[in-house]
Amino acid sequence: MNRRHTVASKGFTLIELMVTVTLVAIALALGVPSFTTFQRNAELTSATNALVAAVNAARGEAMKRGMNAMVVPADGANWSSGWIAFVDKNRSQAYEVGSDITILTGEPSPAYLSITGNGSSGDAAPYILYDASGYSKQKNGSFGAATFEITRNDMAGTDSLAQTRRIKIASTGRIRVCTPKTPIDPQCGASASQL
């Protein structure tokens, strides 16, 4: 008895290979723009969360220690240079190595991110100051609401608005983050809070 076994050939035909390559190319063409948007959002969110963490840490330490705490730019003038959160032990209202307690430091932001502030965070020597009760204050003792704006400077038009985050610090010390919906929405009134 002679039995013949039929063996199926293994592999791809040229048409199957071309169909697979075409489907992969279409998936990449659809996915790459989405990935770029995802990456930009992740970078912006990371920078925003780092600054919010520093401000929250300063507020928490001020209340815990019963002393003033501050967040200042690392170079004393530009938030994009990084920041230092510290407990102002000697009440000098300036960071002094050795006499103040460093809480947290922030790395400089990438060149494509701009960080600006208004209120006390936009002064010539910008700062955020919390008193022992957790209220946001100015150096003269009055209440001090402030706003940070973190935006990508490598985008234009409507895309730049979507790539902007505002950190709003109320006089009570409460922090919220929002994305403005229109360029003339300084308070993010048309936006839902993200924190």
Image (cartoon, rainbow, N blue to C red):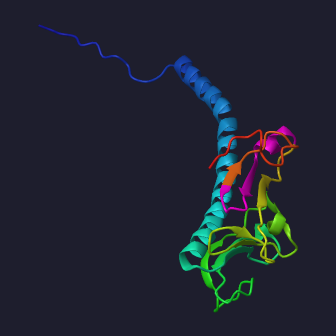
State which region is magenta. Answer: 157-175
Residue 189 falls left or right of residue 156: left
Q: Quadrant of residue 146?
A: bottom right
Q: Quadrant of residue 193?
A: top right
In front of the other: 73 or 68: 68
Q: Give above or below for 112 relative to 23.
A: below
Residue 62 falls left or right of residue 152: left
Relative image position of residue 195 (x, y in whole percent): 62, 50
Q: Give above or below for 65 relative to 25.
A: below
Residue 86 falls left or right of residue 121: left
Q: Does the magenta run of residues contain 48?
A: no
Relative image position of residue 37 (x, y in whole percent): 69, 41
> In percent of the image, x 79 and y 39: which residue is there?
181
In front of the other: 25 or 13: 25
Callout count:
0
Q: Does the magenta run of residues contain 174?
A: yes
Relative image position of residue 76 (x, y in whole percent): 79, 78
Q: Give above or below for 161 relative to 25.
A: below
